[in-house]
Image: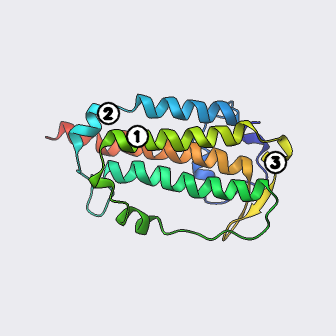
Amino acid sequence: MNKSAIHPMPGYFDRYIDQVPEDLEMVPAIQKSILDIYQLDKEKVANLGDQVYAPGKWTIKQILLHIADTERIFIYRALRFARKDSTPVQPFEEDLFAENSNAGERTLESLLDELVAVRQSTLAFYKNLSDEQLLSVGNTYNTQMSVLAVGFTIVGHQTHHFRIIEDRYFPLLNAQ
């Protein structure tokens, strides 16, 4: 199923869903996102260290762990929705998570390994969902969202952050 089957389109999260090409179906989109992790320019990331492109922004290590943390939360939501649990899920404070992640104490390799492991788990989950489960809808704190929308949000969220790394962090290397 591709993203044209998403109904309702969740406000706010559509900005991530729109990052995924229209013709990609859910499972291939997740598989491609794993390849994108492997293709991240690790040398450039390592050379940047803990630099940020503006005061108050996260380091790349914090971004990578943010992607994994967010995916864990979103896959929990997708599981609840797929299992017809109608209890609204609560929001989380992403800045609090980043501040308390200890990402700076970790190696780049460990962060990328963790992100791939989380994504592999997401892939296994989505490979085994029926169409009915993919279209199941649940309530987040402020919108309704299908399991399909959650999956495309996960993929698009990574794409969004990888573009920020490419567009705002990698140019810092040229300024040195």
Question: Please, is residue 175 above or below residue 79 in the view?
Answer: above
Is the residue under label 3 in contact with that under label 1 (CB below 8 Å)?
Answer: no
Residue at disc 1, secondary structure? helix
Tell me if mark 2 has few (under 14), some (14-19) or many (20+) residues whose alpha carbon lies within 10 angstroms of its own.
Answer: some
Which label number is shown at residue 42? 2
**Identity, as a three-letter code, of the amino acid under mark 3:** Gln
Earlier residue among tags 1 and 3: 1
> Residue at image x 59%, y 31%?
31
Quadrant (top left, top right, bottom left, bottom right) of the C terminus = top left
User: Residue 163's x, y, as percent?
Assistant: 43, 41
| Viewer can see residue 13 | no
Spatial distance from mark 1 to mark 3, Cα to Cα? 29 Å
Do tag 2 and tag 1 residues touch (Cβ < 8 Å)? yes
Identify the image quadrant of residue 19: top right
Q: Which residue is mark 1?
A: 112
Task: Kindly give the residue lying farthest to the left in the view shown.
Answer: 176
Q: Position of residue 70 (x, y in %)?
A: 52, 56
Q: Secondary structure at mark 2?
A: helix
| Mark 2 residue type | Lys
x then y, percent, for residue 125: 68, 43
Q: With 107 as the anchor, is 129 left or right in this view?
A: right
Callout 3 crowding tier (Cα within 10 Å): few <14, some 14–19, many ≥20: some
Q: Which residue is mark 3?
A: 133
